[in-house]
Amino acid sequence: MNAYVGTSTSRVDGRAKVTGAAKYAGEFAADRLLHGFVVEASIARGRIVRLDTSEALKVKGVVDVLTHEHRPPLADKDEAWKDEVAPEKGSPLRPLYDNRIKFNGQPIALVVAEDWETAKFAATRVRVEYEQEAFATDLESERGKAKKVDQPHKPRGDAAAALARAAVRHEADYVIPTEHHNPMELFATTAVWNGSGGLTVYDKTQGVQNVQKFLCSVFAKKPDDIRVISPYVGGAFGSGLRPQHQVVLATLAALALKRSVRVVLTRQQMYGLGYRPMTIERVALGARPDGTLDAITHEAIAVTSRYEDFSRNDTGWAEQLYKSPNSKFAHKLVDLDVSTPCDMRAPGAATGVCALECAMDELAVALQLDPVELRLRCYSDRDQSEGLPYTSKQLRECYARGAEAFGWSRRNPASRSMRDGKELVGWGMATGVWEALQMPVAVRIVLTANGHAEVSCAASDIGTGTYTIVAQVAADALGLPIENISVRLADSTLPQAPVEGGSWMAASSAHAVLGAAEEIRWELACLAKAMPGSPLADLDAANVTLTDGMIVNNDRRGAAVSIADVMRHSKLERIEKEKLNQFAEDKSHARNTHSAVFAEVKIDEELGIIRVTRIVNAVAAGRILNTKTGRSQIMGGVVWGIGMALHEETVMDHRFGRIMNANIAEYHIPVNADVHDIDVIFVDEPDDRINRMGIKGLGEIGIVGVPAAIANAVYHATGKRIRRFPITLDKLLE
Amino acid sequence: MADITIPERIPITLVVNGERRALEVVPWTTLLDALRDRLELTGTKKGCDHGQCGACTVLIDGRRVNSCLTLAVMKDGAEITTIEGLAKDGTLHPLQQAFIDHDAFQCGYCTPGQICSAAGLLAEGRARNADEIRELMSGNLCRCGAYPNIVAAIEQAMSRS
Ligand code: FES
Ligand code: FES
């Protein structure tokens, strides 16, 4: 019974969020709470030769200043600092570990005081002397030092030869700058000291169990000593996948001072966390005159830190999208004196597909073909790198439905041909693709005789709607009204879940809920069968449905017993089941989500002002659990795509290796007035192969393709091809 | 060298959500920190502390204000409404209900500021259509990108008020 799954159910945590009742990591109270303020390095590379905290310690209200010379013990092996999602290669940052400075903005001291204002003031009184070393922070000037990293995509055919003989060829560099997540909530941790040496740590994170294991290993604690909780997360978008500095510092201070400590980073300090690495994407396409491809090559050169190798799949996406007998891909990294990049919404795809889709648009122009038509001529029904069919791929339908809704057939193909008053109008499109991943997750359900169920799991809801879809799936599977379901998430003591990321949590948590609910159902059915005179006596216990508080025989709907009666008769107050759901491995099919994005821009040519007036995003992502929250996720992705296309860029002053716009006034993100019509279309995509419920996930696919669609629309409007993002007005006026 | 002392605390009274609250604050304490840290009204959010994001928006004497740019001592005696004070007797404010109906948030962190700002906007009576709402709500950032739903929610509340 699907009373809730697939509907537009409102968020179950909505009331808490609109009333201010929802508590985020930095908002939990504790007795005699201390406040920490971080002091950061002001050089890009070198070491600290003197760190003088004496003046800061004299400020009334300051309790201590922790530094690498004055702190409790920290683990000294790299392995201890490697969290669940740390890059394989490298040596993770250890805050306050030693005198080495690896990047400008690295935390080097924590001032702890009775109140936040005092800690902040005293932090200005910490004196630091450094010995500086030569450093480099500029990807473009260091491009020659790029090193190749392993790539899953093997070359096929001979791409160089095919390119050389291609009738029509397009080759260009596309440059995507460093971008920062900037979730609205500041990174924060409240580490609550509970007397006996244990800590309850409220942390802003996408994975409480990842943080819990990490803290235990860094501080040599037993699992029971540290509990991590994160009921609400004010956005993260990948920035909360790895444990961040503030959780190490708050824990360190709490252990040192045996008191509760809160550390909140400032907006500026958050620019010392991870980010989407600046990437130079070089794409070459060789086509036959009929608009089919003969060669694709894609090389990405991205920033990483000097201490860890972070890389994602930027280049392989053409294998999924466009048929070509010859292809070659390479991913390279340049070590720089900066903090390690990290995942940021659709890592790899947001950037790589952006370049690929701009290149496809340029090829369409060269071939004098409609951009949608070019994509249809190159359409691949198989993932070419492995030669696999898809569990489902309704991308053709996305093109058709998106084009229809947008009115694409009315597009005049010539650039600078469409106007609205004094504004130039441009229509552009692009394809999006992401992976449909799924992970093991465990869920516990406690059903009580009063017809309520508590569903719990360590997974996070970072705004993605996990609370709501978990409640929906549970309500349907248990046949209860959604009001009778309470959901507990993001507590490290709850059943196992991985970090929330990669769009895998919807499928993973939904199937775990289903699994646990089925165990409850099985037990109820067995109990019901055994009741004297039961109308279900001859029942196959696997063949029942729970609905409206009843256990119903699927073959004879009239034969039913109420759950309450069964539990009363069996003298059970509660039935508790926990189930770890694992997905069977299936290497026979590729699993992806897809989208077709259509964008309209209007441009005031005299001023260079670009407005994105319309976006249609047609998405094929399997079954949509909640059309309301699902639409919001795609819409949010589209807004991110607008930011990526037109606004977002972290600007570094390479003379100091320091970020110049580390705030959200000068690091531009879209504001309300920048966002106009966004039409989200979910294309029907039944998929009974990927998993039982046919779920693929929505967190990433919404952004992919959007920046390219906008860039292509800007070209269509103006005839100017801007290959260096973001497309700001100065570039148009040049 | 003598201890470095910080300024004296000054007694003030704030009327928050209709309730008189007496507290002592140093002059550099912002209204935002006074609400969050001293009065434990954490519904008002801090997203930048620099007047750049609007997460800290509250209503002071009915007008929407960034509480991070307001020193608490300057508001001695003022009437302040925070997100915690909008619902009356358990019934949500029409804007709160509209935000839920239109899914005008994801993570919820910008939401108290958006709702207080929208309440201020409605009181100003300046916004007549979606474009004006967009413009006049542009001081409230939403990184989750809920803007179209925020506009729809405000339009719903506007049409019913
Ligand atoms: S916290 Fe006040 S405007 Fe951002
Ligand atoms: S709802 Fe997350 S920032 Fe607006």
Image: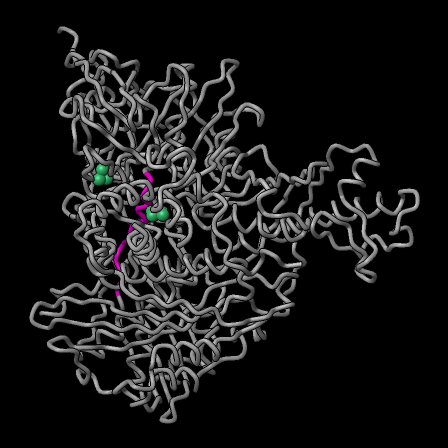
Residue A231 location (% of width, % of height) = 47, 37
Q: Does the magenta run of residues contain A535?
A: no
Q: Residue at x 16, y 77 (%)?
A: A424
Relative placement, left or right, of A625 versus A431 is right
Q: Quadrant where the N terminus of chain B lies?
A: top left
Ligand 1's quadrant is: top left
- Can the viewer see residue A23 in this picture? no
**A200 and B131: which is toward the camera:** B131
**B71 and A299: which is toward the camera:** B71
The extreme top residue here reads B2
- Can the viewer see residue A214 in this picture? yes
In this rendering, the count of numbered labels is: 0
Q: Quadrant of residue A183?
A: top left
- Relative to B50, say whether A376 is above or below: below
Relative placement, left or right, of A35 versus B31 is right
Q: Residue at x 81, y 58 (%)?
A: A558
Q: Quadrant of residue A528?
A: top right
- Relative to A242, say whether A248 is above or below: above
Q: Residue at x 43, y 84 (%)?
A: A376
Question: Which secondary structure dominates the residues rendered in magenta?
Answer: loop
Relative placement, left or right, of A581 versus A719 is right
Magenta range: A175-185
Residue A458 location (% of width, % of height) = 56, 39
